[in-house]
Amino acid sequence: MSSPAERYAAARRRNAHPTLSDFTAELGFSLDPFQVEACEALEQGSGVLVCAPTGAGKTVVGEFAVHKALQEGRKAFYTTPIKALSNQKYRDLCDRYGAAKVGLLTGDNAINGDAPVVVMTTEVLRNMLYVDSPALTDLGYVVMDEVHYLADRFRGAVWEEVIIHLPEHVRLVSLSATVSNAEEFADWLVTVRGDTAVVVSEVRPIPLWQHMLVGGRVFDLFALRPAAHAGEWEQTPRGLSTRERGRAVVDPELVRYVHEQERRHDSWPGGGGTRGGFSHKPRYRPPSRPEVIERLDRAGLLPAITFVFSRNGCDAAVHQCLASGMRLTDETERRAIAEIIDRRTGSLPEEDLHVLGFWEWREGLLAGFAAHHAGLVPAFKETVEECFVRGLAKAVFATETLALGINMPARTVVLERLVKWNGEAHADVTPGEYTQLTGRAGRRGIDIEGHAVVVWAPGVDPAAVAGLASTRTYPLRSSFRPSYNMAVNLVGAFGRAHARELLASSFAQFQADRSVVGLARSAARHEEDAARLLKEMNAGLSAAVLDVAGYARLRMEISEREKALSRDSQAKRRLEAAESLAALRAGDVIRVPSGRRQGLAVVLDPGVTELTDPRPLVLTEDKWAGRLGSVDFPSPVSALARVKVPKNFNHRSPHARRDLASTLRNARAENGLGARRTKGRSAADDDPVLADLRHALRAHPVHGLPDREERVRAADRWLREVRDGERLRRQIADRTSSLTQQFDRTCDVLTELGYLHPAPPQDDAPPAAVVTEAGRRLGRIWSETDLLTAECLRAGVFRGLTPAELAGCVSALVFEARRESAAQPSVPAGKVAGALAEMRRVHTALTDLEREHAVPVTRDPDLGFVWAAYRWADGQSLDRVLAGAQQAGTELSGGDFVRWARQLVDLLDQLAKVADDPLAGIARAAVGRVRRGVVAVAVTD
């Protein structure tokens, strides 16, 4: 029972914040201190940045902004980074305020867009701001959920665009995961949005216990309780490494047991014998996935999310659990799950269920476990999410994308490994990623505590895991850069001069300006060292030979000239080699100059296509047959002789290869084709500039000094210091105006291509520009390949195509393969192949211009989805489409196909709006042909 003083203080607070009092009265639960602080700041008229752990209840502050807007008779926009989150928040707000007051705007859905409260993806709001949409009238509050997405290198710029361009009177509520530079982000928000309160809470609403599973035993990771080890951690010396600091708080019993397991593993004598004279230590086998789930179930730690970091691993885990006979649900739960499955997937076409793996997926979910990853169709993922949130699914095996998705907490989170593929290489999980993944553990209002379990394997140090779990370093780094679409929209809306000022106010520029302080200190150190070395190398020399620095620069110029000539010569040889390969015919005998297949070979197929460099199919003297690439031909190749290749020759037949290889060896003897190596003159031998430099070097006074090399070594050190200092000074100059410079270069590209038209210069003002008709079309294309798409439109690349052919070609502008493939995917012959070849020529011309202006080059068109898009738009079944894609060189899951098809629909829809007829009509027809079956279900859900 509270004291009179406490009741009096509470009454004063209610009177001071009546809107908040009304809001909390409707909630049915009391707010945490950080929620109260943020809501009070918002009621006092400030913008708010709220940083708090996953599941802490940040969205309550956003919901208060919605409540406040409705009470004031103004509009509120609630933005989210992904459509699934938008759909979830739309349902939540409809339940609270009624469907009449709430709208939804995503790329797929437009429901009640004029409502006073509208939930939308961030891109939709960005587009509204650029076209000055009437929907912005009376806008009072914007909630940006998951604002830390601005660090995303593909989409992060959208968040900064919105924050910069929102009208000044709009109050911004930014909700973020815990980041270590919240104050820096808030400082920037103050500069662009005015008064902004910063509310940071690192307190988890549910305490988190950290564990390690070693064999069949579960150990506490820390020696202290969750609430206590944070304080212990703060007392450890800051100078120590993460591993050393982790060792200070890790459970000693766990350390002893792990050391014992590693000792046993290392001392294994070899088991039941040897092979080839060597003993073999058995590979460590961690507990199976069913064993881990059963262990958690016995300890009362379900429901659990197990992060596997592999789609195939997630699916394999479900298969293993099914094969083990595990059942985690009772009859009542299975009936409830079946009802959700029928409701969520009932609209999926019957003929697609088998290829989507529906029946096995259903069997696993009824038993209480399922996979969750981007390879599943949306209907499957949403079914799993609903079952898990309702406590019906007990074990979900997921990739890390779940940690960034919708609200789906668990009692326990399991990490199978602490290494994951980041798109380029296998890398250790970072402290920020670990915090994000384990943040799902602990369901507010259900669990007293959450649990994170790391599965141990040899080489995993508990101290390192403890350091990972306790490190709070998750800095927010801007990924903002001006795109072509952004540039034409900024110039069109504000003019080029004001657009430059807006870019200079971005968070990216704010961080760049702050980072130059350390660079300036480093540059000064290099300059001081250079001055000292200059004195050393000139010590004791007369005025006539005092220029050791000049001599060193001459040597450097000679070295750089030689390297440049070598590079130019190699590039010339590569071009000549490609041209010589294109001239080959079947039956030509050639010499492969280098590589594993070096020697004589006969050409079976020249491998010349419009889309790629020649990759001839050859047979070598040792009977190997296969395609060679440009890497095997660093110099031009020519036909040395000809042999007859039998009609319908099958290079996969050993007998046929043997006979033709014998013919090739006879041709060697008959034509005297022994091994020949000729060494031509290098480009450096005939270069007059290099000859002059070498002459100047020999004539230099320093050249004849007896201690020349010693002095030149000092001069080389001096030169390195000078160049490092100059490099840092250039970095400082570039960073302090990096975005505006990049914007100017981007505008120069657009001007040269005719999307911007230069306006008459005025005094010393920066170049002005106006947007042309082509530029206005580009401003309505929202794609990573925006300028390439616009250039293809102007070049008539898509002219004369059918809807299916157009879908196939446009897919190359959307699709990006998950992994690089050595072989180029095949494409439909005829018009599609011709259009894609023309697209490649347009791309080559564009990237040449981009390199000339030093702007990031547009990525290559990716042909991996062409056959799938073409066949699907042609009306073929999903089964045939996926099988055909695999035959063409691209493996697609049902979820992959749906995701790329949705993005294809989006770009085709944009083309339908910006192109002229008849192409606009063809694009609309293509949209209808792609938006069918399982794709239509995904788009309308």
Image (cartoon, rainbow, N blue to C red):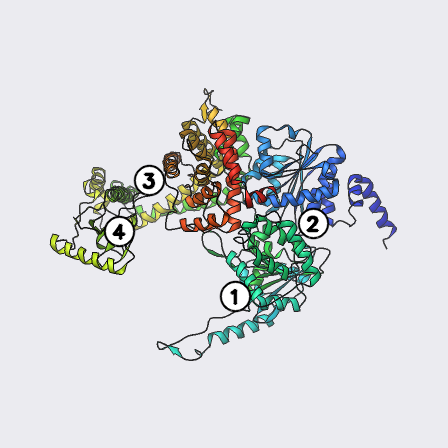
Q: Describe residue 67's horizontal placement relative to residue 914 as left or right.
A: right
Q: Pointers 3 and 2 in contact (CB under 8 A)?
A: no
The CA distance from mark 3 to mark 2 is 56 Å
**Mark 4 — residue?**
648
**Mark 2 — residue?**
57
Quarter occupied by the C terminus: top right
**Mark 3 — residue?**
610
Q: Amino acid at mark 1?
A: Val
Q: Amino acid at mark 4?
A: Asn
Q: Which element type, helix, strand or loop, lies under badge 2?
A: loop
Mark found first going from the N terminus, 2 or 4: 2
Q: Amino acid at mark 3?
A: Glu
- Name the mark nearer the viewer: 2 or 1: 2
Q: Amino acid at mark 2?
A: Gly
Coordinates of residue 801 in the picture (x, y in percent): 42, 34
Q: Residues within 10 Å of mark 2 (few under 14, many from 20)?
A: some
Q: Describe residue 749's horizontal placement relative to residue 337 as left or right.
A: left
